[in-house]
Image (cartoon, coloured by chain):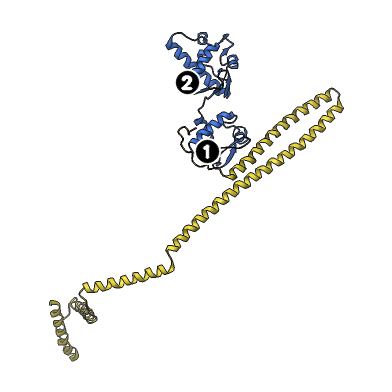
Chain colours: A blue, B yellow
Amino acid sequence: MSFEWPWQYNFPPFFTLQPNVDTRQKQLAAWCSLALSYCRHHKLYTLDVMEAQESPMFNNKKIERKLSMEAIQVVFEELRKKGNLEWLDKNKSRCLVMWRRPEEWGKLIYQWVSKNGMVNSVFTLYELSNGDDTEGEEFHGLEEWMLLRSLQALQTDGKAEVITMDDGKGVKFF
Amino acid sequence: MGNLFGRKSPPSRVTEQDKAILQLKQQRDKLKQYQKRITLQLEKERLLAKQLLKDGKKEKALLLLKKKRYQDQLLDKTEHQISNLECMVQDIEFMQIEMKVIEGLKVGNDCLKSMHQIMSIENVERILDETQESIEYQRQIDEMLAGALTQEDEDAVLAELEAITQGEDVVLPEVPTEPLPEVPEAAKAEPERKEAKKAEREMLAV
């Protein structure tokens, strides 16, 4: 299934930040939702700003338009304010994208665990994100930092406990 | 997370067994990754051997296949080890479940014991005795309140009851009052009965 672009994507002015405040607000909102759904569709969890600019997300080759670096930063900053994005470094060149909140991931994982009657069992993080059992689950292939966060969210709810061992981490569900 | 205000985190619910399981599972994950690597390598070498054969380098292809064979064996061994580890994990998990079952049984047993302590045989005997005494006592009170009828009184009452029921039996049917002249004994008995009846009536009136 290919990604469905919003209509604005083929609209050249969309790739230039609008001066009018109202228009700009709408434009930013559209960009934010585009970026999140793009990442969701391609299951992206970490973005490199430089790469992102070249990727179809911000670069429409058909109409030969791409979003400028500054504009991307503005969009990302907007996403950060909404809690969907976190910078990995001070230069703001790499970031984490959370198109699903850790709590939601946690819920999904916990649902799977309880559905399979594996509450009270111990799992390795690798097993959860790359194991054969989770093949076909939405959280299969989840990056480790995201997985860890969702498990920590579960931990605050008392549904799981993250175990740290010398080499690698594990989790026990309750 | 969550510890922002120095809130004490609840004691860990992770047991030593859990840690052991985790360790085993980590080992298994590593083996699985190793397995993946070897499988990919095998595939690559197979293609390479094909290519070499095409190019006419039979010796090299043979060598490569030998290597591949060795790796195949490694893969088998890895598979075996993984199943060993998984077996171990399952054993531990099952043991944990068994321990829980025993714990549950123990709690039940303790409960039963403590309840038995409350309900010792002497206690039951004592309580039953006491109940008997109470019933006796109650009976005495009843007697006193009921006006303390003696055995004789009771007999008298019973006799009266008997008389009433008999009297009614006689009253109910319409009995001919004329004496039968043919039978002298019956005529003799008649006044006696009348007298008895009279006495009953008097008693009833009282």
Q: CA distance from mark 1 to mark 2?
A: 29 Å
Q: Chain of mark 1?
A: A
Q: Position of residue A66 (x, y in %)?
A: 56, 11
**Rendered view: B4 above or below B124:** above
The reply to whether label 1 and label 2 mark residues of one chain is yes
Q: Residue at x 56, y 31 (%)?
A: A147
Q: Position of residue A21 (x, y in %)?
A: 43, 11
Taking depth in this image into account, of A8 and B173 the one nearest to the observer is: A8
Taking depth in this image into account, of A127 and A162 the one nearest to the observer is: A162
Q: Chain of mark 2?
A: A
- In this image, A103 relative to B47: left or right? left
- Identify the mark at residue A160; answer none if there is no mark: 1
Residue B18: image quadrant is top right
Q: Position of residue B193 (x, y in %)?
A: 17, 85
Residue sticking out furthest to the bottom: B184
Residue B141 in view here: yes
Q: Residues within 10 Å of mark 1 (few under 14, many from 20)?
A: many
Asked if the residue under mark 2 is in contact with the one under mark 1, i.e. CB atoms within 8 Å, the reply is no
Q: Secondary structure at mark 1?
A: strand
- Residue type at mark 1 is Ala
Residue B116: image quadrant is bottom left
Per the image, the residue denoted by label 2 is A81
Q: Secondary structure at mark 2?
A: helix
